[in-house]
């Protein structure tokens, strides 16, 4: 690519919201005011800013597209939380395999105690656990703990193996100190 080709990108190209943000904005714009206020009150400052930016970009979109976005949102909620797959690694050597030897209720207690202060640690652990085991653990976290963890899930795919291993060691240490 020529060196001046990158400089031809506009600020709009660089700050264009993701399709997910636009879909959320479309769905949000189709909601009754009371529902929109309820949802808005639960968003973080960063999430509200993303939503505001998305809303500013979808002003001319028609009602059918907005209703399609609401339907997509309903399907996503019904499907539940999507836990991203960590970067490829040897599952047999995954440092979280040892964590799964602990009872799910004990892991849930450890992760619950970290959810507000170390949500990325919790997200990392959850994404590396077997799906069935993860479901048992996730189901034991309360609504607010889950809400604290959800925004960090997008950071999991790019996490280094070293950081992942350190998080696994941290979890194992926390388990050992509870006994």
Image: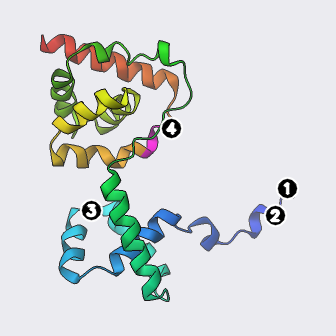
State yes or no: discs 1 and 2 in contact (Cβ < 8 Å): yes
Magenta span: chief secondary structure: loop
Label 4 SS: loop
Work out whether mark 3 precedes mark 1 in sequence or the reverse, and give the earlier one.
Answer: 1
Q: Please tell me which residue is depicted at 54% across the width and 31% down the height of the picture.
A: 87
Q: Residue 1 carries which label?
A: 1
Residues in magenta? 154-158
Mark 3 Cα within 10 Å, few/some/many (few <14, many 20+)?
few
**Of 136 and 21, which appears nearest the observer?**
136
Tag in front: 4 or 2: 4
In the picture of the structure, the residue carrying the numbered disc 4 is 157
In the picture of the structure, the residue carrying the numbered disc 3 is 43
State yes or no: discs 4 and 2 in contact (Cβ < 8 Å): no
- Which quadrant is the N terminus positioned in? bottom right
Work out whether mark 3 precedes mark 2 in sequence or the reverse, and give the earlier one.
Answer: 2
State yes or no: discs 1 and 4 in contact (Cβ < 8 Å): no
């Amino acid at each position: 690519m020529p060196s001046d080709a990158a400089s031809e990108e506009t600020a709009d190209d660089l700050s264009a919201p993701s399709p997910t943000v636009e879909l959320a904005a479309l769905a949000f714009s189709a909601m009754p005011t009371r529902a929109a206020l309820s949802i808005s009150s639960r968003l973080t400052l960063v999430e509200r800013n993303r939503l505001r930016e998305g809303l500013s970009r979808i002003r001319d979109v028609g009602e059918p597209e907005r209703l399609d976005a609401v339907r997509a949102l309903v399907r996503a909620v019904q499907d539940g939380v999507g836990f991203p797959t960590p970067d490829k690694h040897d599952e047999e050597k995954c440092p979280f395999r040892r964590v799964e030897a602990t009872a799910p209720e004990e892991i849930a207690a450890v992760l619950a105690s970290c959810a507000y202060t170390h949500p990325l640690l919790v997200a990392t652990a959850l994404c590396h656990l077997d799906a069935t085991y993860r479901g048992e653990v996730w189901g034991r976290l309360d609504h607010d703990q889950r809400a604290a963890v959800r925004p960090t899930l997008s950071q999991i795919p790019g996490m280094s193996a070293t950081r992942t291993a350190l998080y696994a060691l941290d979890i194992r240490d926390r388990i050992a100190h509870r006994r």
